[in-house]
Image (cartoon, rainbow, N blue to C red):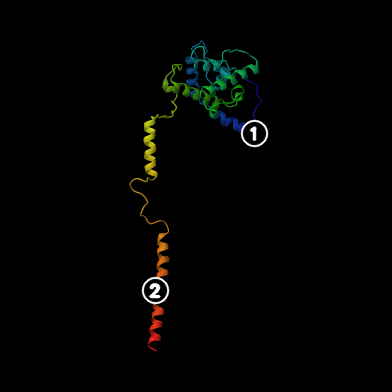
Amino acid sequence: MANRGPSYGLSREVQEKIEQKYDADLENKLVDWIILQCAEDIEHPPPGRAHFQQWLMDGTVLCKLINSLYPPGQEPIPKISESKMAFKQMEQISQFLKAAEIYGVRTTDIFQTVDLWEGKDMAAVQRTLMALGSVAVTKDDGCYRGEPSWFHRKAQQNRRGFSEEQLRQGQNVIGLQMGSNKGASQAGMTGYGMPRQIILLFQVFASAAFQLQTRVAHCCHLAFM
């Protein structure tokens, strides 16, 4: 395990909350899957978060895991070394993380190298491995080993293909919905604002009639004088 000084104050409280998210039952499930998936003589670690970290922190098991999810000859990490040098171990962890992202694990599900190598957030390591297992089950390409029920299958996008004739028919439907010059149209319909125009026209006629009536009355008055 990497050497780290003790945490104090707020830092210790944060670390304790992170450690509480670690799932011991999930640890057992992940260990069983990794050993079965790698199909190699990998030693089963003792139970516990610290032993789980020690088992994975040099990157060897992780690199073997991601390689096992590819057909022979297509492994993303061709060279794996069981080095005791810190920089080499962290390099192999980084190689695994990059390969996992290329494989299909979302960036938001990828842990940071220090989360594993320094044991800062082993719950994040568990989340990454769970996401990796889910992608492997979803791919269903024959490389996954284990029970399909161990990981949930991710929802896949339902792509639908349409022929050119279907696309043309769809455009015709859209055209009719938007309006057409065939059949019903706007011809003969009262346009927007017409009621106001009718009122104004009526007022003009009323004014003219009043003026005419006034002139007739005036003429009659003159005739009888």
Sequence-first disc among 1 and 2: 1
Q: Amino acid at mark 2?
A: Ala
Image coordinates of residue 126 in percent, x first then y, are 52, 24
Q: Viewed as shown, does residue 130 lie left or right of 187?
A: right
Q: Quadrant of residue 220?
A: bottom left
The residue at the far left in this view is 183
- Residue appearing at x 55%, y 22% in the figure: 49
Disc 2 designates what residue?
209
Which mark is nearer the camera, 1 or 2? 2
Q: Amino acid at mark 1?
A: Gly
- Residue appearing at x 65%, y 18% in the figure: 87
Q: Quadrant of residue 201?
A: bottom left
Image coordinates of residue 172 in percent, x first then y, are 37, 38
Disc 1 designates what residue?
9
The residue at the far front in this view is 223
Against 65, residue 22 (above or below) is below
Q: Nearer the viewer, residue 83 or 52?
A: 83
In contact (CB < 8 Å): disc 1 and disc 2: no
